Amino acid sequence: MKISVIGCGYLGAVHAAGMAELGHTVVGVDIDAQKIAALTSGRAPFFEPGVDGLLQSRSDRLRFTTDISEVADAEVHFIAVGTPQAEGGAAADMRFVDAAFASLVPHLRPGALVVGKSTVPVGTAAAIAPQVEAAGASLAWNPEFLREGFAVADTLTPDRLVYGVRAGDDASVALLDRVYSTTLASGTPRIVTDFATAELVKVSANAFLATKISFINAMAEIAEVTGADVTTLADAIGHDTRIGRRFLNAGVGFGGGCLPKDIRAFQARADELGVGHALEFLDHVDQINQRRRARVVELALAALDDQGSRDATVAVLGLAFKPNSDDVRDSPAVDVAVALAREGVRVVATDPQAQRSAARKAPAVTIAPTVEEAINAASVVLVLTEWPEYRDLDPAALAPLTPARVVIDGRNCLDADKWRAAGWTYRGLGRS
Ligand SMILES: NC(=O)C1=CN([C@@H]2O[C@H](COP(=O)(O)OP(=O)(O)OC[C@H]3O[C@@H](n4cnc5c(N)ncnc54)[C@H](O)[C@@H]3O)[C@@H](O)[C@H]2O)C=CC1
Ligand SMILES: O=C(O)[C@H]1O[C@H](OP(=O)(O)OP(=O)(O)OC[C@H]2O[C@@H](n3ccc(=O)[nH]c3=O)[C@H](O)[C@@H]2O)[C@H](O)[C@@H](O)[C@@H]1O
């Protein structure tokens, strides 16, 4: 099948490559000429394991362009443009979605299917459908659940597929089934529903995940004043299969281009719909999350005060919002580093992949190419992204680099006993 993907960022580029891997002929469109040039040369403009391999191995049926008219012969068009938090507000900024539809509609051929993938406020598809239908085409909403760092696997073998369509629009369902025939053949569950439910499935899934993380971080706050250990608590409650252990890792909290902005946009939309009270709890979820960042800053400053001076260096290991990504959008690590720099502390940070993106975002932070250079002579070491290489650090080998030997484990990812045995003062979050 001929497919187009409009918007080739973290989601769209992986989706385009994934669709080519599933056997389709794909054209990816973006307004950013630099991204298109990188993708055309077989390189994703961001770090995501496995994507470059797909871009290169499927180049025979995958191309990228800035010219929207090149999508005209596609049967199915995916919309994957950004829906960031609007500046100065909580709602989603829908300008990119509106512009993408406006540029696509004149090129639609009758019978084509436009499929929204972007995460949008409930009600968006119903509002947009008439302009698509006026061109003799149909609209479906097929939200995406991929995780950065696992984007390729999540695209090729998702946990589920959700199709939001007009009541009785069997033709669109059949087209989507053809798009995902390989995925469906491997037994992936598929839910066919209306536009509103499909849109809500996406934001409620992210709201649930954010709530789960903030729940355990709230327990961490309690653990901190009671001497309890939140990690043991998470293990213990996680054994209950109704609760589950996943997404119960307490630490500096959630960040990224999705969970934070999605819970805020969801609340803003509920307000518009006159049911803001239903999602008031998400405000607390957000506040708990923000408090964890402030807590790490507080712990770092307290550790400096213990050593008698704030005229010192803090080393930050990890800048990406999660491992296996170079994404620093709303990254807790970057936020903490910037907050410390604002307090007059010299912050030297490193990350295996996010050094460049973080340097652009946080010029007040000095970027070091290696862990050793970041830690050298630092009074406090913060671990803020649980990269495997940081989990596996040898505390004994690092100890001579820093006379103070204080480590604050913002992701509870280090082996506390091993660090203490090597002479470090270890401090986790929510751990005695
Ligand atoms: N990043 C992720 O892991 C996931 C993202 N999503 C959702 O997918 C959407 C996209 O997110 P990301 O890929 O992370 O954003 P992104 O910012 O990385 O990519 C968006 C892309 O759209 C392009 N664009 C903007 N206007 C355009 C237009 N009129 N025509 C063509 N291209 C245009 C931008 O240049 C950019 O490359 C958002 O709604 C997000 O919430 C959903 C699931 C996972
Ligand atoms: O809508 C989206 O864009 C995506 O948002 C999240 O995916 P992602 O942002 O890639 O990353 P997650 O693995 O969800 O992690 C989000 C944040 O929560 C943090 N986290 C995660 C798990 C945990 O136990 N504790 C915790 O603090 C991570 O460090 C990270 O900062 C969802 O997991 C995806 O299903 C969704 O498609």
Image: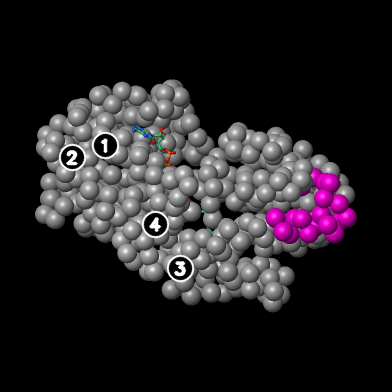
In three-dimensional space, the C-alpha distance between marks 4 and 1, rounded to whole angstroms, equals: 23 Å
Residue 275 lies in what quarter of the image? bottom left
Q: Percent position (x, y) of residue 52? A: 46, 32
Q: Percent position (x, y) of residue 308? A: 88, 55
Q: Residue at x 54, y 47 (%)?
A: 330
Pointer 1 residue = 101
Q: Percent position (x, y) of residue 276? A: 38, 65
The answer to whether 213 is drawn above or below residue 237 in the figure is: above
Residue 353: tell me if it is visible. Answer: no
- Mark seen at residue 281: 3
Label 1 neighbour load within 10 Å: few <14, some 14-19, many 20+: some
Q: Percent position (x, y) of residue 388? A: 62, 48
Magenta region: which residues?
A: 297-315
In three-dimensional space, the C-alpha distance between marks 2 and 3, rounded to whole angstroms, equals: 36 Å
Ligand 1 located in image quadrant: top left
Pointer 2 residue = 132
Q: Total marks drawn?
A: 4
The figure's colour scheme reads one colour
Pointer 4 residue = 268
Q: Are marks 3 and 1 in contact (CB under 8 Å)?
A: no
Q: Are marks 2 and 3 in contact (CB under 8 Å)?
A: no
